[in-house]
Image (spheres, grey):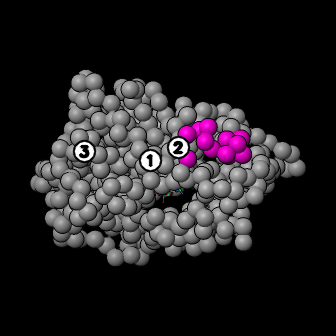
Amino acid sequence: MSNCAIVGINWGDEGKGRMVDLVTADYDVVVRYQGGGNAGHTVVNEFGKFALHLLPSGIFRKGVVNILGNGVALDCESLWTEMSDVMDQGVAITPENLKISDRASLLLPWHRDLDSLEEARLADKKYGSTKQGIAPFYSDKYQKKTIMAGELLYPEKLWDHLAGILEWKNLTLERVYGAKPYTMDDLKAWVAEFGEKIKPFICDTGAFLRQAQAEGKHILFEDYGIYPMTSSSNAIAAYAPVGSGYPEVKIEKVVGVVKAYSSCVGEGPFTCEWFGEEAEKLREAGGEYGAKTGRPRRVGPIDIVATRYGIQCQGATDIALTKLDVLSYMDEIPICARYELNGQETDAFPFPAVLPDAKPVVEYLPGWQCDISGVRKWEDLPEAARNYVEYVEREIGCHITYVSVGPERDSIIIR
Ligand code: GDP
């Protein structure tokens, strides 16, 4: 078994959580290497239905060690809330099965405030942020104005470091946004409430990964973010070694998760977008409402141009095509095969500034119009469904290894 990364190829919500939950059976260690509480991954298994935000999806598997690497936006508040929910449903979380990198930076209370304040300032030009503080967090990290989780273990040094950052951050809060400043007492109360809870899980996860590999253990790198379409975090597979604190590791297999149609939360160009009744039907069929926010997602047909670009960015070696069952109601299956830009058809993903000018060129394949959610073998899929999968495979130029036909762990066809 080789080291493997699982990454999203489109605009998020492709079903990554479900794929990770499936493949963790073959791995000993699951690592999250970037992003934070902005993600929302639905996992359905024997413990129930969960929307995971920060916890690696291997948390449900006995014997699997889960790691939050140095590249994540470590939101102790959101993490502790999530850990409590998951533990309440009978899942054990201990320092044996969850390890938090001492080098991960803490997402602090003002990051969330700044996210909301900036979205409000932008008004109709807002990014459509999930307001979990991810963009302000990563920009502070670039500015070396964050606290590492390991500092929680050295309180005297922590207060001193935090006081300096607090002074600097209050300038922005008060003078740029006219918002309420924070005090050291606020921060001490926050650390006492949430930082203390995660302390037992903090360790040198890079050293743990090296040791695990030396012992022949298999490592799965899990991406919860969205690249290249948005997000301030670095969700590409190539970042996994760095964001995991194990830069020299080799990742041989990259599974890109692609949805059989497109969906997108938030603002920004979404070339293949459908509106009106046909969008409503697809949204209903796919249950396309945000796991974190409940917002209706924008939907449309699969976008070959954006998917091919996503696969290149991620260096995917295998594809998991999810939610094929959702298309079963359609007479014809729509595919955004190319874009039209300035009167010319193109296969290339445009430069972001001109992306809003691109129009979708849509082709149709025959539908299958029957329930495929019980199918487990490739040859048992209706011919029209196989044709659709093969068409997509040819156009995106990457082998579709998994076809998912339902949210449950076993609703999968492996080719
Ligand atoms: P993630 O963020 O990429 O993990 O995706 P989300 O959890 O936001 O969205 C995926 C949704 O689709 C979840 O509700 C899953 O249970 C569901 N899902 C995943 N794969 C399939 C599938 O093949 N068919 C159906 N019908 N639902 C699926």
Question: Quick one: SS at disc 1?
Answer: loop
Mark 3 and mark 1: Cα distance apart in space: 18 Å
Can you tell which mark lies on residue 376? 2
- The range drawn in magenta is 375-387
Element marked by disc 3:
loop
N-term mark: 2 or 1: 2
Q: Is mark 1 within 8 Å of ligand 1?
A: no
Residue pictured at 61% horizontal, 42% vertical: 380
Give residue 229's position: percent from left, percent from top. 58, 51
According to the picture, the residue beneath numbered tag 1 turns out to be 410
Q: Amino acid at mark 2?
A: Arg
User: Foreground mark, 2 or 3?
Assistant: 2
Residue underneath mark 3: 62
> What whole-number distance in Å separates the C-alpha atoms at marks 2 and 1?
8 Å
Residue 376 in magenta?
Answer: yes
The quarter of the rendered structure image containing the N terminus is top left
Q: Specify the principal SS of the magenta part.
A: helix
Residue type, numbered disc 1: Asp
Q: Observer-nearest residue: 124 or 88?
A: 88
Bin the neighbour count of mark 2 within 10 Å (Cα to Cα): few under 14, some 14-19, many 20 and up.
some
| Magenta-drawn stretch contains 95 | no
Is the CB of the residue bearing disc 2 within 8 angstroms of ligand 1?
Answer: no
